[in-house]
């Protein structure tokens, strides 16, 4: 399973890159706003900076919701760098645009996916990635991981090439469960990724190793 980081923070992207585990980045308009990035030119420049940190795929989301607008915005985004993936919402005009991008060699990430039916439609349209938002499904007491598992099963049965990018990750357990459910990629905030490091027995064990070394190697 590949690891993407779900943020627009250059510092956090750099930290994940330095850790040596980063395969790509996802952003959305809310994450850009959180970093205080606004205005078309600034947003495009920010994507370019992200693409300087990683050569993994970087999802950049369109704001337009009409077919022509999505195409125009998507082409501007795709021109920023070869690793830009155009993030398109799961709406009728978005599906038409995903088909156009696929036919014209532009990678897409179909976002705001909440059902297996939507995942089938996006795969049929030729999406490179689909993003089921499993945390938001859990938020309304449904089962986000079950959604990822169902999509993975359908894609395996049907032989779809679209990759499942488990999104809206809230904690380290979501990452582990996504791996078990058959996600191809997980996109997570840095603190959820770092949560994978934690185990009290690791801390206790390391403390004892160091104490034993110091006892037998007095200074
Ligand atoms: O990748 C999608 C993600 O950014 C949404 O996460 O936490 O806003 O549901 P969240």
Image: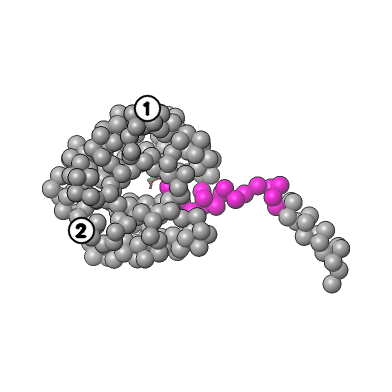
Location of residue 13 in the rendering, given as x and y in whole percent from the top left corner: 44, 60
Name the residue at 31% across, 64% down.
48
Quadrant observed for ligand 1 in the rendered image: top left
Residue located beneath label 1 in the image: 157
Report the residue that reaches farthest toward the front.
Answer: 159
Rendering quarter of residue 57: bottom left
Query: Mark 2, residues whose alpha carbon is within 10 Å: few (<14), some, or many (≥20)?
Result: some
Q: How is the image coloured?
A: one colour
Count up the numbered dots: 2
Location of residue 88 in the rendering, given as x and y in whole percent from the top left corner: 26, 45
> Could you tell whether 22 is left or right of 97 in the image?
right
Q: Is residue 16 magenta?
A: no
For the residue pair 105 and 120, the one nearer the viewer reads as 105
> Could you tell whether 66 is left or right of 219 in the image?
left
- Which secondary structure, mark 2? helix
Quarter holding the C terminus is: bottom right
Name the residue at 42% across, 41% down.
184
Whether residue 168 can be seen here? no
Name the residue at 31% across, 44% down.
128
Circles 1 and 2 in contact, beta carbons < 8 Å: no
For the residue pair 153 and 34, the one nearer the viewer reads as 153
Which residues make up the magenta segment?
187-203
Rendering quarter of residue 142: top left
* Residue 98 - label: none
Whole-Å distance between the Cαs marked 1 and 2? 36 Å
Name the residue at 33% across, 39% down.
162
Residue located beneath label 2 in the image: 76
Q: Give whichever of discs 1 and 2 has the lower sequence position.
A: 2
Report the residue that reaches farthest toward the left.
Answer: 68
> Could you tell whether 98 is left or right of 207 in the image?
left
Location of residue 152 in the rendering, given as x and y in whole percent from the top left corner: 40, 32
């Amino acid at each position: 399973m590949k690891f993407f980081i779900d943020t627009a923070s250059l510092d956090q992207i750099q930290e994940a890159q330095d850790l040596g585990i980063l395969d790509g980045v996802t952003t959305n308009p809310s994450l850009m706003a959180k970093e205080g990035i606004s205005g078309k030119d600034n947003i495009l420049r920010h994507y370019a900076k992200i693409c300087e940190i990683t050569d993994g795929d970087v999802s950049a989301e369109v704001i337009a919701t009409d077919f022509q607008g999505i195409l125009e915005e998507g082409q501007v985004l795709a021109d920023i760098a070869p690793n830009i993936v155009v993030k398109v919402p799961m709406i009728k005009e978005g599906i038409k645009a995903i088909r156009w991008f696929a036919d014209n060699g532009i990678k897409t990430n179909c976002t705001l996916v909440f059902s297996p039916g939507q995942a089938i439609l996006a795969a049929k349209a030729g999406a490179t990635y689909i993003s089921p938002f499993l945390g938001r499904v859990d938020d309304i007491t449904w089962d986000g991981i079950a959604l990822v598992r169902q999509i993975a099963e359908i894609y395996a049965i049907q032989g779809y090439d679209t990759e499942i990018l488990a999104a809206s990750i809230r904690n380290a357990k979501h990452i582990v469960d996504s791996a078990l459910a058959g996600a191809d990629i997980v996109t997570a905030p840095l603190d959820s990724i770092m949560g994978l490091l934690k185990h009290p027995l690791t801390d206790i064990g390391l403390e004892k190793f160091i104490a034993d070394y110091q006892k037998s190697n007095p200074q």
